[in-house]
Amino acid sequence: MGKMNHQYLPLFLASCFFFISLSQTTSSTSSHHHCLPDQSALLLQLRQEFVERNYSDYYDYYNGSYPKMKSWKADSDCCSWDGVTCDTQNGDVIGLDLNNSWLYGPLNSNSSLFSFRHLRKLNLALNNFSSPIPSEFGQLVRLTHLNLSRSFLHGRISSQISWLSNLVSLDLSFNYFEYSVGGDYYEKLLDLRRIDLEALVRNVTYLRELHLDDVNISSSLPQSLANLSSLTSLSLSSCYLQGTFPSDIFLLPKIQAIDLSYNQKLVGFLPKFQSRSSLKELRLPYTNFSGEFPNSMDNLGSLNVLDLSGTNLFGELPNSISNLKSLNYLDLSSSNFSGAIPPSIGNLSQLTHLSLSYNNFHGQLPSILGNLKSLNYLGLASSNFSGAIPPFIGNLSELTSLSLSYNNFHGQLPSTVGKLAKLNSLRLDNILYHQEVPSFLGNLTQLQDLSLSQNNFDCGFPIWLTNITKLRSIYFNGNQLKGKIPSEISRLPNLSILDLSNNSLTEVIPSVLFTIPSLYTLVLNQNQLIVPLKFQNISLSPLYYLGLKAQNELQTLDLSNNSIEGKIPKWFWNVGKETLSYLNLSFNLLSKFEQPPVVLPWKNMQTLDLSSNMLQESFPILPLSTNYFFASKNNLTGGIPPMICKVRALQILDVSNNQLIGQIPKCLLKLSNSLVVLVMRNNHFQGNLPEMFINGCSLKTLDLNHNQIQGQIPRSLVKCQMLDDLNLGNNKLNDTFPFWLVSLPELKILVLRANRFYGPIWDPHINFDLSKLHVIDLSHNNFSGKLPSEYFQNWSAILGVTGKDSQPRYMGADSSFYKYSVTIVSKGLEMEFYMGGDSSYYKYSVTIVSKGLEMELVKILTIFTAIDLSNNRFYGEIPNSMGNLKALIVLNLSGNNFMSHIPSSLGNLIELESLDLSRNSLFGEIPQQLTSLTFLEYLNLSQNQLTGPIPQGGQFLTFQSSSFEGNSELCGFQLSKKCGNDEMPTSKMRHESSLGEGFGWKVVVIGYACGLVIGLLIGHVVTSRRTDWLVRNFGVNLRR
């Protein structure tokens, strides 16, 4: 028996191994292929909830985009389906990776997705759901990884997201939903309330990655974020964060990446970094972090990326920066760093990106920068570097982008720059001292973007550039390029941007420019292109039409400030017909449309500028997409067509200085919820202004000066709560003073001059509080009554109680297309001063009287103030309270019937430059206190009943007899009637007065750049400490 047992033992063992092996194989197969029927059904149901749609043409979906669900088949095991992961033990779906899977359609709260209660990892990124995030995500409590980024989600993030206490990674970044209303585009973001963020941070104690970029948080961050000890990556860019960033987060033991970019209201300070920090990426661009560059930064030995651009960090860079041996990306641009560049920076041998632009460095570039052989980006623009441009730059053979613009370099560009064979972007603006463009730049065959503006090149356009066929953008603006624009530019098949503005180019605008298929920006303003806008060779017309058909990319075309004359040809209507959004033909000699279209043809036009030509046409019908239309200073005739009212996106309409007639369309005023600027001055509009202003009115400027408008000011104007400039001067309005204007809290300029207004401008029952008023002109009306002492007590801006701007700003809207003006009458001339933002495009003007001249202010600082009540029927005393208007610069009360002494309190108007009290019935002596007005440049007290000696000293030494004539009892050296103790002032006394005799004006036109009409006209030859005040702050357009 024992023998037999031994005999069958091998067979027995073999059988055991077989059954064990079979059992394992069966178990393995079952485990791998096991798919629960309900899971399969739910997945197929989920597939039906979405449409497959590829958005790769509209959004960057990266590589690997395909519809994963398309391969899901009902007769196969769901655990093997693309993007599906199952639990090997029980077959439950525990992972879904459907990122970039062409899913289109909303995430609904009843989605089968929320039936997968065992899900641990869910990735739905890079799809298009265009819906809010359902609160039902909070039911998936086993989730450790949730990624919903870049999926067009929007709306409030539910508080139930905090129920996901097992989360290790949460990514809701870069979601938005775009929609349009009346042609304007808006975005909806995801919103996360502070209370919900606190709950999330409190519950997700295992969290390692938190990415909420572009989520609207709009609050401070909870301090409890610093308690997430497992956190490795925190990304909160563009979250509208406020308050102070918890600096302990920088010191978390496992933190590797922090990105707080573009939170401009987020205050913060860099801590004292600890050694052994694991931080690899620190991105703080365009935040409000401040303080000095910390020496402890050298403890961050693992740091790869450091971006502190656009912050308020300051100080010198320490030599210890060389300890950041792993650094490959360093951006310190647009900050406040200073001093010399430490030579040790050349030891950062891993650097591929170095940007130090827009700082306050000084000195020469250290030659050791030539050691940074791995650099592919070097940005050193606008940082006060000096010395010669070092030749070593040509040795940085890996460079693809180089910017040296706007420094204080001298000498020539080293020819070694021509050896940078990989360079695709080169910016050398305002630093070169070559008469001609260096020809060795022609060796840069990979160049795509070239900017050589403001270098005073005195030559023709370098034709050899047209051999660099990869060029996409060329900026040669602000040079002295001469001759014609070469047609060889058409050799550049990839050219997208061509800016040759502000040069001395002449002859024909080549037709081939319009045939480059990729060109979308063409800027040729401020040249001497003198021939009519037409074909160079009319026999080429058929080819030209073919070219126009091919040209379907042009978006920006600026031909302003040339001498293009004659008719706008009919072929021009086909230029950029489908794409053109900006067209500027202003300041030319265009006279007519060769073949006027019924409707201007550009379907996407936003800004159209035809101003300052000689167009003799009827008012054109605008494309419905138009936002800004400028046609001032032409000879447009007829009325405004009612079709204008269908242009619901219109924000600025300026048709001033034309020959337009008829009534202002009622429906136009109904557009006031979109219109910001309406300027129709100097036309022949008639009739009454209708009561058509609506709730939500957006008007900031309404200028109807110099028309024939009758009736009353419409009371519905009070609905325009943003109105800051109201100019109704020089019309036929017949009304009492509009006390109801006190309801306009932003009103800064009020001009009602030269109408038929009547009655008092004061009512004891109305508190006329115009706290922001800077300019009021009620001259040449029939206003009457007394001015009580309390009348001006709430005019805060003129009282000066708001304080002067340390950095004076220009009045007007913030829009870069917004500029306006005020006209002041002074010394028999009309002077125009521009007003508006520093980079403003739009301007309008207002006329008031100052210094005896009529001046049109087209640019005015917030410190400018003026009161003109002249040529009315006011009587009684000039109130002493006028002496409290300490910010007042211009005061004109002439041509009334004031009967009183000149208040000595006017000596308190320390900013006053122009005082006109002529043609009243003022009596008594001139107050000696007026000699303390050290800025007073114009004084007119003529035609009164003043007596006694003219005060001596100060500005009074500069005024001539015309300031005092018509006062028979006055005496002084300025008049033929001398006082008993008169002494002629010596030349030394006159010199010490620091003033010349009055002042004169010269017209000086200072530049026109990139289509922005700035037209500053300057002068002023007095020598007080305000000698150049108007030169600095105003442009002047003189008209006799």
Image: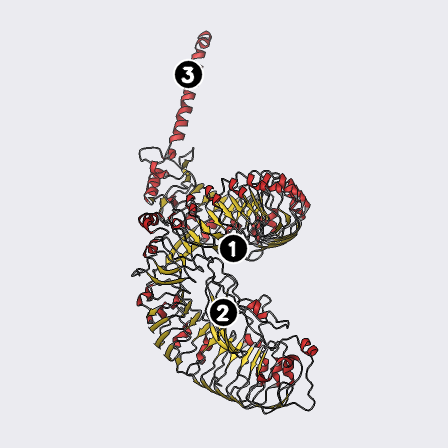
Secondary structure beneath label 2: loop
Residue type indicated by callout 2: Val
Q: Are marks 2 and 1 in contact (CB under 8 Å)?
A: no
Tell me the CA gap for discs 1 and 3: 93 Å
Residue type indicated by callout 3: Ser
Quickly name the residue at label 1: 478
Pointer 3 local density, CA inside 10 Å: few below 14, some 14–19, many at least 20? few
Quickly name the residue at label 3: 15
Pointer 1 local density, CA inside 10 Å: few below 14, some 14–19, many at least 20? many
Q: Nearer the viewer, residue 322 or 533?
A: 533
Q: Is residue 606 above or below residue 100?
A: below
Q: Is residue 815 left or right of residue 914?
A: left
Residue 640 visible in this rendered orientation of the protein:
yes
Q: How is the image coloured?
A: secondary structure
Q: Residue furthest left?
A: 598
Where residue 469 appears, x then y in whole percent? 45, 41
* Residue 12 found in image quarter: top left
Where residue 730 appears, x then y in whole percent? 42, 78
Tell me the CA gap for discs 3 and 2: 104 Å
Quarter occupied by the N terminus = top left
Q: Earlier in the sequence, mark 3 or mark 2?
A: 3
* In this view, the mark in front (2 or 1): 1
Residue type indicated by callout 1: Gly
Q: Are marks 1 and 3 in contact (CB under 8 Å)?
A: no
Quickly name the residue at label 2: 858
